[in-house]
Image (cartoon, rainbow, N blue to C red):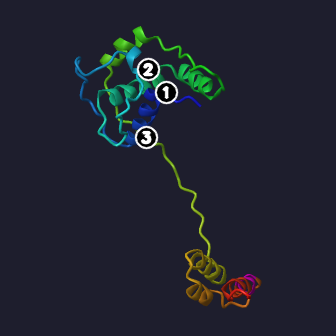
Amino acid sequence: MWRPFWLAEGAAEYVRKAGRAADTKAVSEQEGFSAGDVVTIVPSATYDDNDPGGAFRTESYRLLRILLDEKPDLIRQYLQSLRMESEHAPVNDIDAQAMDSRLKSYVETPLKMPPVTAAVKSSEADMARLAIHRGDLLLATERQADASRWYNADSKDARAARAIITRFSRPAAE
């Protein structure tokens, strides 16, 4: 799937800025890019995603916010075209000329976190099954002696684990 650089950077900033104060600092004319440039820029060979974001990242985020707020159908259609298999990169219908002035005058507003309730389920752990898993982990790290101590329950799984460890810990027949 083709992933445009501006969209990846803009979406990452969208997630990063959710619930935080807005960055109202304007991008200078010298550092800024036109909307047409923002949607065509590709990462350089020395690009490092961990470096602090610059004007491109800020403008990618702002362009994404403009499109989400003012032209949600356009961005939805563009995302659909990105999902389609094609030998060529999908063409976006973003009017770069119209977006250019909007991008330059955009004032960032705080991006509120959506209300979410986590659906966390908890239950009591079966200690016999946990013992088997601990033994399996120790066995995977080639600590057979330690692993065999965890296979002491009177269950089908523990008996099978003891049989396996016994089989593979015997010396080879001559």
- What SS does tag 3 mark? helix
| Residue range corresponding to the magenta coloring | 157-161
Looking at the picture, which amino acid does disc 3 mark? Val
Distance from label 2 to label 3 (Cα)?
19 Å
Pick the residue in front: 157 or 21: 157
Mark 2 vs 1: CB contact within 8 A: yes
- Quadrant of the rendered structure where residue 101 is? top left
Q: Residues within 10 Å of mark 2 (few under 14, many from 20)?
A: some
Reply above or below: 91 against 85: above
Would you say residue 55 sits in the magenta stretch? Answer: no
Quarter the N terminus occupies? top right
- Rendered position, 9 above or below 105: below
Of residues 121 and 96, the one nearer the viewer is: 96
Give amino acid for label 1. Pro
Residue visible at 60% across and 64% down in the picture? 121
**Residue at mark 1 to residue at mark 3: CA–CA distance:** 17 Å
Q: Residue 4 carries which label?
A: 1
Residue 27, horizontal then vertical, whole percent: 25, 24
- Which numbered disc flags the more N-terminal residue, 2 or 3? 3
Give the vertical position of 114 relative to 156 (above or below). Answer: above
Circles 1, 3 touching at the beta carbon (< 8 Å): no
Of residue 37 and residue 64, the one placed in the foreground of this image is 37
User: Which residue: 57% across, 61% down?
Assistant: 120
Q: Kindly identify the residue that appears in the image at 57 percent across and 25 percent down.
A: 76
Query: Which image quarter: residue 97?
Result: top left
Residue assigned mark 2: 39
Q: Residues within 10 Å of mark 3 (few under 14, many from 20)?
A: few
Q: x, y percentage for residue 88? A: 59, 19
Q: Mark 3 points at which residue?
A: 15
Q: Which amino acid does label 2 sit on?
A: Val
**Disc 1 element:** loop
Q: Where is residue 124 in the image (x, y as percent from the top left)?
A: 61, 77
